[in-house]
Image (spheres, rainbow, N blue to C red):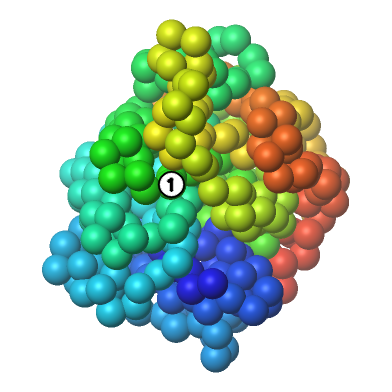
Amino acid sequence: MKYLVTGAAGFIGSAVVEKLTSAGHEVVGIDNLNDYYDVNLKHARLKRIEHGQFLFKQVDLADRVAMQSLFEESQFDRVIHLAAQAGVRYSLENPYAYADSNLTGHLNILEGCRQTNVKHLIYASSSSVYGLNAKVPFETSDSVDHPVSLYAATKKANELMSHSYSHLYDIPTTGLRFFTVYGSWGRPDMAPFIFTKKILDGDTIDINNNGDMWRDFTHVDDIVEGVVRIADVVPAKNADWSVEAGTPANSSAPYSVYNIGHGSPISLMDFVKAIEDELGIEAKKNFREMQPGDVYQTYADTQDLFAATGYKPKVGIKKGVAEFITWYKDFYNK
């Protein structure tokens, strides 16, 4: 297969490229290499996956002309669209970055797939779409109409935009709602990275909602396995589906949405303790109130994804944290 992977210099994207090329697929990866976080880390990820089966191009998703040319020249079989402006809190500071990357960028991907008859589009949604939902675990049959950040709203919009293209043009699309991914080569703006860096540097870590928070931490190796497997599960049209009797995760169109997470939430304090134990250092902690855009708990029901792919996460917190910290110390010479 010939794949396009967007966000190829990113945390999950670079790991997906590595998995696909090791399986013999041809991959074109794009990334705009923006400075939302350390660009050197992005270049290091790219250097790690450079070889003959992989071609990297620096392209901005929001550049309509460049994206159109990319699709026309390359004729992809499948697209794994992971690029986006990430981060919940940053959406409070720079909302227009989310409109450009997550809305205009997603539309350019959909148009590219339409114009070149891509056989399957897999794209990143987010657990943040569950917003004010209090019932757990989160199921794809739940309503996701009450996001609490612009980032979450753009991810919900991506699902709606994808459904319209699946309905109008028979493009098979699969959305994946990611739940708190961590591991080697992770993002510096995420809690595991922030906590590890600050603890090693002797700085104080901020603990939101006074520590009463839960996250469905999922190791990147498990995420990548799920992404690559779902690429082979191409949604089909279903004439028997209806809005009244069906689930929002499926459609009469070739459209599906899945949760992709570990399925067993961990308390924030237990996660911090795992980092402390691995480092052999007790963190200095600043307990504070819930922050704007945050949610109390994430918890994925992943039964649909397991049924479709056989995907079942294997990496527990102790092993996953140890793997991440080993990488962190090596990469930053700590």
**Where 1 falls versus 281 (above or below)?**
below
Along the horizontal axis of the image, is 311 left or right of 254?
A: right
The amino acid on which the numbered mark 1 sits, given as a three-letter code, is Pro
Along the horizontal axis of the image, is 89 left or right of 215?
A: left
- Report which residue position mark 1 lands on: 172
Residue 210 in percent (x, y) is at: 61, 20
Q: Residue furthest front?
A: 239
Query: Which residue occupies 81% across, 48% down?
Result: 315
Q: Quadrant of the C terminus?
A: bottom right
Residue 119 visible within the image: yes
Along the horizontal axis of the image, is 19 left or right of 112?
A: right
Neighbor class of circle 1 (other Cα within 10 Å; few <14, some 14-19, many 20+) is many
- Secondary structure, mark 1, is loop
- 291 or 27: nearer the eye? 27
- 257 or 167: nearer the eye? 167
Identify the image quadrant of residue 311.
top right
Residue 295 in percent (x, y) is at: 51, 22
- 197 or 27: nearer the eye? 27
Residue 213 visible within the image: no
Query: Which residue occupies 21% across, 74% down?
Result: 69
Q: Quadrant of the N terminus?
A: bottom right
- 322 or 300: nearer the eye? 300
Query: Which residue occupies 55% across, 24% down?
Result: 140
Q: Residue furthest bottom?
A: 52
Residue 21 in percent (x, y) is at: 61, 76
Identify the image quadrant of residue 313.
top right
Query: Which residue occupies 85% across, 51% down?
Result: 319
